[in-house]
Amino acid sequence: MEAKASGKPAATDGPSGPLTAQDLSAIEDEEVLNKMLDEARDFEERRMIRAALRDLLKKKREKRERERGSRQQDLQQQGLSKGGATSMPLTPARGLMNQQPSQHKPTSQLSPSPPGAFNKTTHSKVNAAVAPAVKCPASAAPTTKNVKQMLLDWCRAKTEPYEGVDIRNFSSSWADGIAFCALVHRFFPDAFEYSILNPNKRRDNFQLAFTTAEKLADCPPLLDVDDLLRMDEPDWKCVYTYIQEFYRCLVEKGLVKTKKRA
């Protein structure tokens, strides 16, 4: 004889069987998905979790766009009702990332950042002579290519779900500040709203990333924003040094787990 169902669903912490896209789409907390991604070991599960993160960020962005559009329409109607027909129409916020063409990915919608004031060769002289604020010690160069590549792969994996970020190196991929913001947001998702960032506002992006990392991860601001703004592409040794320090701070706070050497 079959046992009668109690009528109450079994209480579980998560899906009882293998993860499905439907299970992941029901999760609306970035931090939960990030934690699941860190703990997942199966390749297919990691792929689905990354896709869910991308969808969640997209939903948040679209929701914010709808809210902005509604507010803009209300303000326009209020202006017209008060006889403000001759006033200039309100334009959508430029911070919406999906209204900009991408600098990195063909499928992304971010716009390229404006060119810097001088080229790489000029910067190397300025950086060595008059810009000591960008702290690039001689030890910034990796001892082996393997260490540098491992850190680059780590940055790429952590920022993969983020629109407008395609990390391929420690120089041009970080030029508009969006990659810095994405990496910081990956570990501190409640610190700021990533979806409203504008790649054309380089100063704002750099300052947001560095101040957040300093406040929440105790990472010293080794890079000078003004120097970065004068470059087309930042010096890779400077970026590499900063990312190394940020990684070290995350390890100290227990946000990144490393394998202990024997």
Image (cartoon, grey):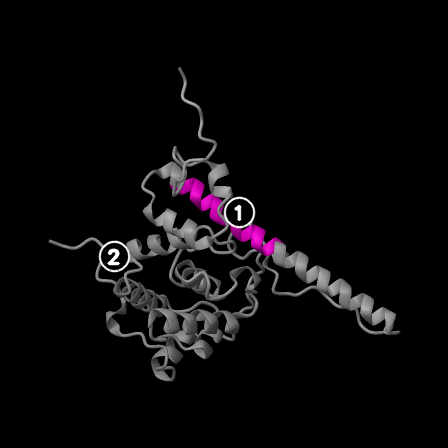
Could you say where residue 60 lies in the image, as x and y percent from the top left? 57, 54
Q: At x 42% / y 71%, what residue is drawn?
A: 212
For label 1, the residue is 55
Is the stretch drawn in magenta largely helix, strand or loop? Answer: helix
Q: Is residue 237 above or below residue 227?
A: above
Q: Is residue 53 magenta?
A: yes
Q: In the figure, is residue 96 to the left or right of 221?
A: right
Under circle 2, the secondary element is helix
Could you say where residue 257 lies in the image, as x and y percent from the top left? 26, 55
Q: Quadrant of the N terminus?
A: top left
Task: Choose top left, top right, bottom left or bottom right for residue 183.
Answer: bottom left
* Extent of the magenta region: 46-62
Q: Is residue 19 above or below residue 208?
A: above
Q: At x 42% / y 58%, what residue is drawn?
A: 186
Residue 166 seen from this side: no
In 3D space, how far apart are the residues under numbered discs 2 and 1 (Cα atoms)?
Answer: 32 Å
Q: Is residue 126 above or below residue 113?
A: below
For label 2, the residue is 147
Mark 1 burial class by Cα count in 10 Å: few <14, some 14-19, many 20+: some
